Amino acid sequence: MTDIKVNVQNNDNTITSLEAPTDMGLSLMEFLKGNDYDILATCGGMALCATCHVSVIQGFEHLPQITDDEYAMLDTLPNITDTSRLACQLKLNPDMDNITVKIMGDGN
């Protein structure tokens, strides 16, 4: 079993570090929801609602390429950043060790 460290930047700019398994096929969204973070995930992980929008503070270069569907959804948001991703589209893997994300939600 390979665990990675996922860091979450909280609203007060503190960082919470969590151990995340990479052998269960979880998305970042599922992992964050499982750790009681406030992510609506209204569409259930289909890249249709953007309620799992995160800004990647550290480790963006280690993520898989963004898909056209994911970019199209992100492009509708008022608070998009250069490192915005949908957490539902990011499957946890060893390359993501020590990633830092900030939960942005759907911008509302």
Image (cartoon, rainbow, N blue to C red):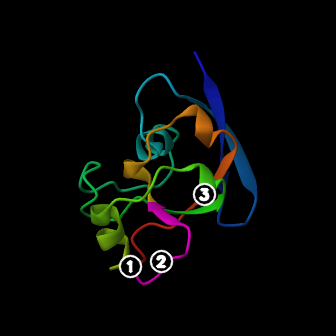
Say what amino acid the circle numbered 3 marks: Phe
Q: Which region of the structure is painted magenta?
A: 78-85
Q: Which residue is mark 3?
A: 60
Horizontal side of 34 relative to 60 (left or right) equals left
Q: Residue at x 44, y 53 (%)?
A: 87
Residue 80 inside the magenta-drawn segment: yes
The residue at the far top in this view is 1
Give the crowd class for mark 2: few <14, some 14-19, many >=20 residues within 10 Å.
some
Q: Residue 60, percent across and down?
A: 60, 57
The Cα–Cα distance between marks 3 and 1, rounded to whole angstroms, is 19 Å
Along the line of sight, which residue is nearer the eye, 84 or 108?
84
Q: Which residue is mark 1?
A: 77
Instruction: Mark 3 vs mark 1: give the one in front.
Output: 3
Q: Which residue is mark 2?
A: 80
Say what amino acid the circle numbered 1 marks: Leu
Residue 5 inside the magenta-drawn segment: no
Say what amino acid the circle numbered 2 marks: Ile
Could you say which disc has been placed on residue 39 in the image?
Answer: none
Dots 1 and 2: beta carbons under 8 Å?
yes
Q: Quadrant of residue 42?
A: bottom left
The Cα–Cα distance between marks 1 and 2, rounded to whole angstroms, is 6 Å
Give SS at disc 3: helix
